[in-house]
Amino acid sequence: MVKQISVFLENKPGQLSEITKVLTAKNISIRALNIAEAAEYGIIRLVIRKHDEAVAALKEAGFVTMESEVVAVKIPDVPGGLNIVLSTVSDFDIQYMYTMIDRAGNSAFMVFRVEDVEGFKKIITSSGLNVVDEL
Amino acid sequence: MGNYYQEEIECADRGQIRAWQSERLVEQVKFVWENVPYYRKKMEEKGVTPEDIKGVDDLYKLPFLSKADLRDAYPYGLMGAPKEDIVRIQSTSGTTGRRVIAFYTQNDIDIWDDCCARAIVAAGGTKDDVVQVSYGYGLFTGGAGLNGGSHKIGSMTLPMSSGNTDRQLQFMEDLGSTILCCTPSYASYLGECVEERGLKDKIKLKAGIFGAEAWSEEMRQDIQNKLGIKAYDIYGLTEIAGPGVAFECEEQRGMHVNEDHFIAEIIDPDTEEVLPVGSYGELVFTSITKKGFPLLRYRTRDICVLSEEKCSCGRTLIRMAKPMGRSDDMLIVKGVNVFPSQIESVLLDQGYTSNYQIVVDRVKTTDTIDVYVEMAAENFTDNLGKLAQKEKALVAALKSMLGILVNVHLVEPKSITRSEGKAVRVIDKRKI
């Protein structure tokens, strides 16, 4: 299962580095990252292997956090690869998604946030696509 | 039925209370006439003499005192007893202008301590309790008042004063404090710390007595939950005595005024006319037993309502509602009256915390009001659209409460400075 940590951040200079400082101090590395921003605040979403440790560290540092399960789908490395994935789930209500590229493994992944995680996974796997358990 | 400190007074027949008030008022007016030239002059200007005051029904004939009078008569002009009989002074926190200095004889201190003792007993206090007084000590009346009341009951009293939160929590845990007395904003902060540090099961608090600030019902719930206690309101002002002028019982439905010492009236703040019980208006107090600083018909500028309805706690003392705020706290924004307590109650109702700040400014000729509120875990979601919806809902709720548009800013937790005494809720840049 891939877990995501969302953190509330005010939109002002240096705020993002407050988070990276906390994670660096605990020797925690980030696998995937995405930011959604409004005028005055934003939400940073993180996928981290040391998930529980990261949540504890961020909470201790006073951040408001939220944990949720996301679905990471491996994108076939062919032209139109993303299109194959998206066509498969075109009927699904996707809240948001973002990419993650693993240079070492030469693979690209799409991280999806959906309400119905199990249903989403079922459609993906029954179409012969790969859901990964860890990023 | 509850616990009483002085049952024969707190549960006396209403007729008896009125008789005490009449008798004491007549005596007090004579005393003031003879000993406070400043007030005597005011009476003479109004054509009133002590002979005109035969009882409570004649109270309306007396002139009012206001904060302006305290300024004019500063420092000794309103002192009643001779200086050699004064044993103590206390002073206001000075949050709204010039400091007020009040004088106490030993008997005044005893009266005040009794009033605070009634409040502590009403909150369940006995000599077996450990009372942690985390109001400021010194000139501020909070620490001195509750300290005195706690001594009267014979409770073990921890004179903590405000601040040094680590030490507060340490003593609370190590000595097993059962009753906490401080400002509601500090109680809320202590509650936050207790939660964060996982101390809730280690502390033995059962009740809290919180005053010196306007606070909402929602904030009461919040403090009660965080600390696992019953939270009691207490009312007072330095000019009249300090905390204990009125106190809450277990019913938590208004504060019983210690009417054997203080007469409460509600007036129309504009016409100065006395309003019938049950009307909203400005609260006015007359001190009928204290001699050091015997203020008659002092206008508190607190807006509230009185109730004579019988209280199930058994007390017959009249009750005053939580003041909506001192009229000094009231902001006039775009011509509309705004009490910070109204904003607070909306915030808590919408799931935010009581950590907020209100900034009022004027851009060219238009007033602006901005509320900065900390994002709370229960309101956070990872979906930007939903977050914006919640923010919109908050703006709408504020608009429906106040009738004006408020700019809301969601900020990170802990970004609003915590208070150890009276919280700084409002920054009015129009005055800077």
Image: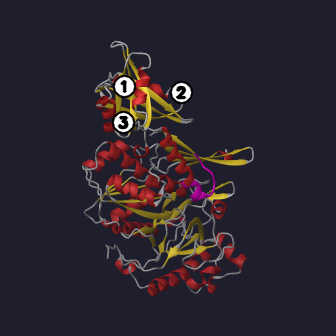
Q: Residue at x 46, y 44 (%)?
A: B418
For the residue labelled by badge 1, is the local secondary structure a helix, a strand or a loop? helix
For the residue labelled by badge 3, is the local secondary structure a helix, a strand or a loop? helix
Rendered image quadrant of residue B414: top left
**Circle 2 residue:** A13
**Do tags 1 and 2 sit on the same chain?**
yes
Mark closer to the chain start, 1 or 2: 2
Using a 10 Å C-alpha cutoff, classify the residue at mark 3 as few (fewer than 14 neighbours), some (14 to 19) or many (20 or more): some
| For residue B281, side relative to residue A135 (left or right) | right
Counting from the top left corner in percent of width and height, residue A12 is at 54, 30
The reply to whether residue B338 is visible in this rendering is no
Q: How many marks?
A: 3
- Label 1 and label 2: CA atoms lie apart by 18 Å
Inspect the image, locate mark 3, and give the three-letter code of the amino acid beneath it: Lys
- Label 1 and label 3: CA atoms lie apart by 11 Å
Mark closer to the chain start, 3 or 2: 2
| For residue A98, side relative to residue B79 (left or right) | left
For the residue labelled by badge 2, is the local secondary structure a helix, a strand or a loop? loop
Q: Residue at x 41, y 45 (%)?
A: B163
Inspect the image, locate mark 2, and give the three-letter code of the amino acid beneath it: Pro
Residue B404 within the magenta-colored segment of the rendering: yes
Q: Chain of mark 1?
A: A
**Circle 1 residue:** A23
The reply to whether residue B244 is visible in this rendering is yes
Q: In front: B33, or A33? A: A33
Q: Which mark is residue A59?
A: 3
Counting from the top left corner in percent of width and height, residue B354 is at 46, 50
Which contiguous range is marked in magenta? B397-407
Q: In front: A117, or A77? A: A77
